[in-house]
Image: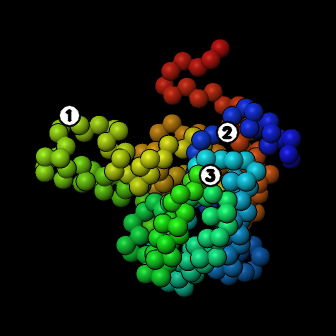
Amino acid sequence: MNDSIEELKRAGLPKHVAIILDGNGRWAQQRNLSRTEGHFAGAQAAERLIRFAASDLGLRFLTLYAFSAENWRRPKQEVDALMGLLKQFAIEKLPDLKRGGIRLRIAGDVARVPQETREAVEYVTAETAAGEGLTLTIAINYGAQQEILRACKLMVQAVASGELSEAEVTPENFEANLYTAGIPDPDLIIRTSGEQRLSNFLLWQAAYAELAFPDTLWPDFTPEEFTKILGEFQKRDRRFGSVGGE
């Protein structure tokens, strides 16, 4: 696998990869386990991939869709388990993140997140702000439609107050009001489990992203499969609306 990693690096890695972590529940169901156990296995897969992306690949930006704005509709026990896992990840992995130069960012409206989880992730975000390696963004209580509406409201307020002129309502200034401000748009978005939809994830930022939909359920997703998808990505002709190469 080391040779394939070096080949990927020589060919040029994407700057930003975003992943929809899908399939924890089905993975657990197939094994007669609880959904909570499926999410725990999914958390282990996330840790594995973060280490690989940061240390082996040297990826610059990785975004993981951990909890959507719609996930509050799930049973309370499952939601509580997910929030507990996020808190546990933040607290237990802080030394590893700092040691690896990984900078944690959060995308989403964390006001609704339980206080202990919110405080834990905000603390780790502050503690890792100086990291110069991988920027790891975890989307928590995130919804792209809600994010776009929030950015619109902020720009309307800025125009109304005179802080921004109508001529300054540009894509660049709009993006500065998104949760992902300062992060390049994803080059590649992966959704595991075979489902082929974005589910309200990075809708503005995904305008020219390449998409991949492996059948693998998230807890079974490995660095080897990630490497394979990156290799396939590098073969694609990204035209951005222009004429492709001959």
- Which three-letter amino acid code belongs to the residue tagged 3? Gly
Task: Depth check: give the residue in front, 105 or 19.
Answer: 105
Residue name at image x 37 percent, y 72 percent = 111
Q: Is residue 194 above or below residue 106?
A: above
Image mark for residue 98: none
Q: Position of residue 67 (x, y in %)?
A: 51, 67
Q: Which residue is mark 1?
A: 167
Quadrant for residue 92, please give it. Answer: bottom right
Residue name at image x 43 percent, y 81 percent = 115
- Say few, some or many: other residues with alpha carbon within 10 Å of mark 3 (under 14 / 14 to 19 / 20 or more): some
Q: Secondary structure at mark 2?
A: loop
Whether residue 21 is visible? yes
Is residue 169 shown left or right of residue 205? left
Q: Nearer the viewer, mark 3 or mark 1?
A: 3
Pointer 2 or 1: first along the chain: 2
Pointer 3 or 2: first along the chain: 2
Image mark for residue 133: 3
Q: Position of residue 150 (x, y in %)?
A: 30, 56
Q: Secondary structure at mark 1?
A: helix
Task: Depth check: give the residue in front, 105 or 24.
Answer: 105
Q: Which residue is mark 2?
A: 13
Is residue 167 shown left or right of residue 20? left
- Say few, some or many: other residues with alpha carbon within 10 Å of mark 1 (under 14 / 14 to 19 / 20 or more): few
- Which three-letter amino acid code belongs to the residue tagged 2? Leu
Q: Position of residue 122 (x, y in %)?
A: 46, 70
Task: Depth check: give the residue in front, 109 or 215.
Answer: 109
Q: Position of residue 158 (x, y in %)?
A: 19, 50
Pointer 3 or 1: first along the chain: 3
- Which three-letter amino acid code belongs to the residue tagged 1? Ala
Query: Which quadrant is the C terminus positioned in?
Result: top right
Number of numbered discs: 3
Q: Secondary structure at mark 3?
A: loop
